[in-house]
Image (cartoon, coloured by chain):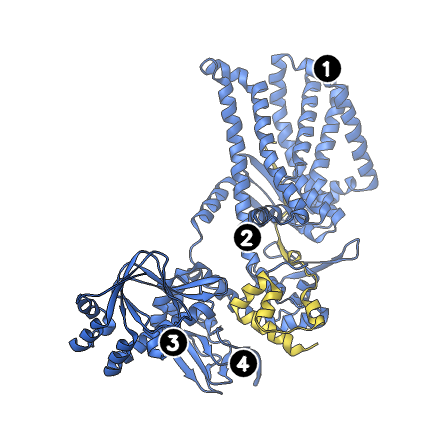
Chain colours: A blue, B yellow
Amino acid sequence: MDVRSTPSFAAPILAHVWQFRAFSAGTLDALAANAARETAARGAVVLREGAAGTDAFVVIDGRLEVQIAGKSGPLPLAVLGPGDLFGEVAILAGVEGRTASVVALTPATLLRIDGAAFAQAIQDDPHVRTELEAVAERMALGRFIKSATLLGDLPPGALAQLAERVRVRRVAAGEAVIRQGEPGEECFLIRTGQLDVIVSEDGAERRLATLHTGMLFGEAALLTGAPRNATVRANAESELVVLRRDDVLAAMSSERELAEHLEALMQARSRPRRREGVQLHERVTSDGATIVTLKDPARGKYFRLSREGAFVWNRLDGYHTLRDLTMDLFLEYKVLAPDVVMGVIRHLAAEDFIELEHLDATATGAPSRRARMFGALRAVMEWSYSLDGCDAFFSGLYEHFGRHAYTRAGLAATIVIAAGGFAAFVAMAQRSAGTLLHAATVARVGAALIPLVVLAILLHEIGHGMAAKASGARVDRVGLGWFWFRAMLFVDTSDAWLANRRQRMLVDAGGILVNLVLAGVAGYVALLAPNLTVAAVAWVFALWSYVAVLRNLNPLLEYDGYYLLMDALERPNLRGLSLGWIATELWPALRSGKSLRGHRFELFYALGAVAYIGVVVVWALFAYRFTAQGWVARIVPPGSAPAFGRLFAFTLGGLALFRLCSDVWTEGARLRARERAVIHKG
Amino acid sequence: MSRDAVAELVDRYLNDEAFRMAFARDPDAAIVAAGFELDSEELAALHAHVSAHDNQALKPRVTKYSFGS
């Protein structure tokens, strides 16, 4: 730091410090006579928290940051610029140690005022002292909010603004700060003291919690508009920082995460209640574990619960608080898991299985641009239209036809047809290929194939529906739409979540079994049909069916193979959890050198998904070369047909990559939202 | 086992956002830093295996077949 003797230029600088506006000209001259100009390089620490010193400073030019020590590094409190005063708190409080650090953000020029002269000046002018004390109190409030409360992540500007607007309220022991049933426009931070949260029920009072320094209360009524849900009474003399609704909302708009913190706090203190009509289903797995699944028939939604989750669910009666639930779980199972209880509650609330207070959408802010972009893209690429109330149709179909396929004899017939038909298909390969060498036959085969393929897809979906009925599940919805440039049919077999593993795998395989039977029948036709064209049509249809089976068995897309793998492993939402892990944990694990041994499966799945994109590109290149390139070469400039093939292949690969990235991002965002309330033990 | 100590810890978890975040990062460190003293039985309860992933919304099972197959 460079210190030089000061000419008489100090007086006009001091006259522009607003805290000094009440000083007389004589007092300002006296201060100027004891002031010296100095400079500070970028990054220089002008004041160090805890260090001795009583001199005050005025910023002439440059920018400096006021900081206090936090657990994980310095916490910025405010940014100072020309005309700002700092360092006066030590003099006002009569202490030697600095209460904060001040660091130069840019090269700065300062006016250092001798501490003794400054103390003499404010002693001579009590009005200025009062004003400076008020400023010091605001700074102290800012420090408290920054270092000890959930508002601590606010940016310095918003924090300083908030500290300007709050007021301090002192309450005596026994005094009620808020009362149950009253409207609420303010919430409170506890600066010192201790208060009890009390709820009145049936004429009796029940203490829900005791609150200490740094904790916030009164936020629920303020953010939801509902009356106060409890009384808060001081059990010792306490000092509170009072925040008004508008100020809290302004702070929430400055700091996105604050809204999440406040919602979490509000929900942590709630008394959740189960929604009407939700059913609980239990089943025991082959290894003796009990799996509990909730079903909301009105919305067709399902939720799986652990043993502890089910314990919590059974107590969500609108009376038990999260504290009660956590303590009951602890006493019943010797599991101390407030995080898991809170995670279950928040997740059930997010899926609308329970009634719980939420922040108003305007308070939580608009979704990010990336979220809006992916949302809009998905809406365009994955559109569907569905018909509800189809279960009676599928039940009737199953009773009259489908059930025969799920008897021992039916399954034996399926195997015989599929296996024998495949043998016939292989045997007829050479003859069918010979027939297909004639262009006229190819055109006839192509025309005959289209209705057969449409019929096969329809029967494939009916096959899922029949398998679901055979497993005792409902089929409430069928539909059509498009899925990433492809038209699709679908059936909703979500009710199979209530079935056991074997039954669910049967539902997953129901469509593929239909394809195998159809391919088998086509193989026999190809073998036995006297007409060569009919035989060729049957053989090509069988070929298409086998390719369709293989494609459906791909577990890397959400087709039948994915569901089969998920159910075989008993890992619901396998794709979402794997891609979410890639988005949230892979990079931090690689960077910190953490072992990936416990996450082999997620890694394998992600590598498979990336490798699949490569397969798509290679397949497209080959398919184009052996089918379309010759045709394209006739209509494009000579030599450019291969380039069109590469364009086609890389466009397909790019779309597949984009979809994978979209899924990784979406699942990552979902998992992060969940992680904020839940940790994973064990 | 002291039920009061556990209740106090649960109170703190549910009402103090900063403690909750510290607990999510490292429960043991958060408990020590906050001045709670748990006995061996309570610590065992804290470390009891609970898989949060078992509590999850189940995505719709939509078995679809696209015409590009």
Q: Mark 3 = which residue?
A: A96
- The quadrant in which residue A1 appears is bottom left
- Residue at the spot 71% in from the left edge and 67% down from the top edge: B44
Does A107 sit left or right of A267 as displayed?
A: left
Badge 3, how many Cα within 10 Å: few under 14, some, many 20+?
some
Badge 4, how many Cα within 10 Å: few under 14, some, many 20+?
some
Q: Nearer the viewer, residue A144 or A462?
A: A144
User: As shown in the figure, which amino acid type bears the numbered disc 3?
Assistant: Glu
Q: Mark 4 = which residue?
A: A198
The image shows residue A13, relative to residue A204, as above or below, that is above
Q: CA distance from mark 1 to mark 3?
A: 101 Å
Q: Mark 1 = which residue?
A: A431
Dot 1 or dot 4, earlier in sequence: 4
Dot 4 or dot 3, earlier in sequence: 3
User: As shown in the figure, which amino acid type bears the numbered disc 4?
Assistant: Ile
Which quadrant would the N terminus of chain B be assigned to in this image?
Answer: bottom right
Q: Mark 2 = which residue?
A: A670
Q: Chain of mark 1?
A: A
